[in-house]
Image (spheres, rainbow, N blue to C red):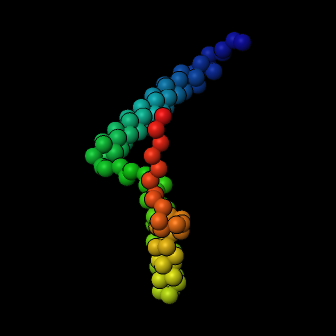
Amino acid sequence: MTIRPVDMQVIVPKVTEVGRLQQLQQQAQELQQQFVAQQTQTQAEQRQKTVQQSPQSEESRIRDRQRSKERQQPKGEQKGKQERDDSRDDGLPAGDPLRGRMLDITI
């Protein structure tokens, strides 16, 4: 492919224009990268300064659910439930009152 003198007169001014456009695009990319880096740094600093919320343990979630259920139940049902829970708390079988509850084992 040969370049004629007429084509050369058109190409030379275009080369400088294209070079300028490429330089502007490169500068824009560099500025954008700097902005993203600065934004990332400020976010990291903010995360370091703020207290992170610790995850709730499963036990506290269960407790919260039970409390919300108790609030939703009518008061009569709560009293009946407390009486049932109180009777369960003994945990001892109804046995002979004359027998002891301790068992000594020697080996």
For the N terminus, the image quarter is top right
Residue sitting nearer the eye, 16 or 87: 87
Residue at position x 49%, y 73% in the image: 87
Residue at position x 31%, y 46% in the image: 46
Residue sitting nearer the eye, 22 or 39: 39
Residue 50 x %, y %: 30, 49
One can see residue 91 in this view: no
Hey, which residue is sitting farthest right in the picture?
Answer: 1
Residue at position x 34%, y 45% in the image: 47
Hey, which residue is sitting farthest left in the picture?
Answer: 49
Q: Is residue 28 above or below residue 80?
A: above
One can see residue 37 in this view: yes
Residue sitting nearer the eye, 9 or 90: 90
Hey, which residue is sitting farthest front in the picture?
Answer: 98
Q: Is residue 68 above or below residue 107?
A: below
Residue 88 x %, y %: 51, 69
Q: Is residue 49 above or below residue 86?
A: above
Left or right? Give the position of 88 relative to 43. right
